[in-house]
Image (cartoon, rainbow, N blue to C red):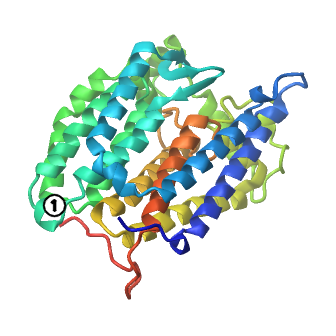
Amino acid sequence: MQKPTWRHFDLPLFLATLCLIAIGALMIYSSYEATLPAEDKPWIENAVYRQILFGGAGLLLYLLLAVLDYRLFVALYRWVYLAALAALVMVLAVGSTSFGARSWLGVGSFGVQLSELAKFLMIITFARVLGGDDEEMESPRHFLLSALMVVPPALLIYRQPDFGTALILVATWGGMVFLSGVRWRHLLMAGGAAAAVAPIVWFQLKDYMRLRVLGFFYPEKPDVMALMQEHNIDAYNVVQALISIGSGGWWGKGFLHGTQSQLYFLRVRHTDFIFSVLAEEFGFVGSVLLLGLFAFVIMRMMRIAGRAPDPAGRLIACGTAAMLFSQAFINLAINVNLLPVTGLPLPLISYGGSSLMSTLMAMGLVQSVAMRQREPQAGLLEGPIPRSQ
């Protein structure tokens, strides 16, 4: 196997990732720790310190995975897939419940959300299943196999219930399918099948999930509002998030001066709605800079995909980019009331050790692809990604 070459280590990607983690730690302090009354408590209960601890562990795994050859994991994709399923089954069997979802496995004073690990493991699995050459992709076999393989983990995550993470898993699979070179006729066939089963999926959703969607599309209907009140569902967080974003103006109110977070108007402000806190304190300019950092990270990963030495490496980079983009897009859309609330953190920014570590592990595997890249050829992407035909 090709030895890693540190001169190919993508330092701009690594530095941009560090910037996002640092911004996240600052916003967790501003939105949560700075708003709490002064009290003596163990340092391990401090949200900022915990986030930094998880970030440090995640960065160690990042560098370890960069050194290891990603093809070792791809070759073991069957065991990787079984490990993802086993982790999700174990959570349903012996996991602890938090915020109404059995998503956590307790380890001492820490909780591990194994569905986040499953997302990382499934990227490796899909990279192998969808990593065929052009001749193999003429057959629908790889596409159908990947579609069958995404169903069990998505259902297990949904059963927790965690619709948001299940949605990200399916979105990651969809992005990898599109970028793998699957033919358009296969995609159209899948679209028809999805349309056929959509009514079944709708009626299988939990009541509160359907009400969130209905409340989003029909906010003025009295019967919908009555049902939402009956199930203790309201649009309070979204309203406060919009107030936060709108009151930030061009330059924001300044660090630690956001009234919606400092005066407790905005709930879950250090997780799902942390972007609203940033927008209020740093305004439009700070928000655009954050979006620019995310765009830069995703573009660097697509650049690595263009130089990958094989289809599996290309799909690992594309899959990680698709996961990061879809999760960031959905979280930001929820904050500005463009999508119904699903309870997703903003990657690398929101408080949450499991999400932070799994994202860093996936990005470390992308660095493994970068360090084994082929020498660049002439052209913008140095080897364009095959598109669907």
Q: Is residue 326 left or right of residue 250?
A: left
Residue extending farthest left: 139
Q: Residue at x 28, y 63 (%)?
A: 311
Residue type (three-letter) at the residue carrying disc 1: Arg
Instruction: Determine whether the residue tagged by mark 1 lies in a helix, strand or loop.
Output: loop
Position of residue 33 measured from the top left corner of the image (x, y, whole percent): 80, 33
Position of residue 15 measured from the top left corner of the image (x, y, whole percent): 65, 63
Q: In the rendered view, would you say 88 is above or below 313?
A: above
Q: Is residue 327 left or right of residue 78?
A: right
Residue 120 position by quadrant: top left
Q: Residue at x 43, y 53 (%)?
A: 320
Residue 145 position by quadrant: top left
Q: Is residue 341 left or right of residue 45?
A: left
Q: Residues within 10 Å of mark 1 (few under 14, many from 20)?
A: some
Q: Of 101 and 251, which appears nearest the observer?
A: 101
Q: In the rendered view, would you say 156 is above or below 121?
A: above
Position of residue 384 measured from the top left corner of the image (x, y, whole percent): 32, 75
Residue extending farthest bottom: 378
Q: Residue at x 55, y 68 (%)?
A: 10
Q: Quadrant of the C terminus?
A: bottom left
Q: Of 110 and 70, which appears nearest the observer?
A: 70
Position of residue 38 measured from the top left corner of the image (x, y, whole percent): 91, 25
Query: Which residue is tagged 1?
Result: 183
Q: Residue at x 22, y 45 (%)?
A: 146
Q: Quadrant of the N terminus?
A: bottom left
Q: Is residue 95 visible?
A: yes
